[in-house]
Image (cartoon, rainbow, N blue to C red):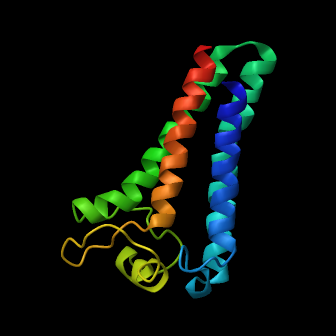
Amino acid sequence: MLALALTLILSTVAYHLVMTLIDVYPLNNVRDAKRREQWTEVAVNAPVMALPAVLLGLAAALKTPTFGYVAGGLELLIAAGGLLLWWLPYLVGVTVPWATAGTGVTWAQLHARTYAHTLIVLPRIGDRPRPNLEHMILHALMLAAAIATFAAAAG
């Protein structure tokens, strides 16, 4: 289970990096993102997303499940942040305060410019921004990583 958890965590980080920096339109729309926005997202998110792998590795090396549970909790917190960022505006019409930190635009503006032209499989709810397929995959990876990490810590 440890190998699966580490693979899922690191796959999530790798997926996030690829989707943030490499144009694979129509899954993402990197061509319409500003380079500064891309690097800000990588600089903020990649280290945080990789930390559960470090903690889980420490848990295994030191035979201390506490680090594994902290890793699972952190992975779950990261997933919750992504879910809140994308699903609150879609389902409830509320944008989280950190949605566009440092960009100088609203979430609706950023979504319209960067995400609205990507693959989206969800039906419209008024004019609310919808999670795109790219982020639905990312959120599924995060949740799977969190579950596997807790299982690894318990094993």
Counting from the top left corner in percent of width and height, residue 122 is at 31, 67
Report which quarter residue 59 is drawn in.
Answer: top right
Name the quadrant of the C terminus: top right
Report which quarter residue 74 is drawn in.
Answer: top right
Q: Relative to residue 108, is residue 43 depicted above or below?
A: above
Counting from the top left corner in percent of width and height, residue 40 is at 64, 69
Q: Residue at x 30, y 64 (%)?
A: 89
Residue 48 can be seen in this image: no
Q: Relative to residue 139, is residue 4 depicted above or below?
A: above
Q: Relative to residue 84, is residue 75 depicted above or below?
A: above
Q: Relative to residue 64, is residue 136 depicted above or below?
A: below
Closest to the observer, 142 or 92: 142
Closest to the observer, 92 or 98: 92
Counting from the top left corner in percent of width and height, residue 34 is at 61, 84
Asked whether, in this view, residue 127 is left or right of residue 151, the answer is left
Residue 36 can be seen in this image: yes
- Residue that extends furthest to the left in the rendered view of this protein: 126
Asked whether, in this view, residue 49 is left or right of residue 101, the answer is right
Name the quadrant of the N terminus: top right
Report which quarter residue 154 is drawn in.
Answer: top right
Q: Residue at x 55, y 47 (%)?
A: 141
- Residue that extends furthest to the right in the rendered view of this protein: 61
Q: Residue at x 45, y 58 (%)?
A: 136
Asked whether, in this view, residue 56 is left or right of residue 83, the answer is right
Closest to the observer, 38 or 152: 152
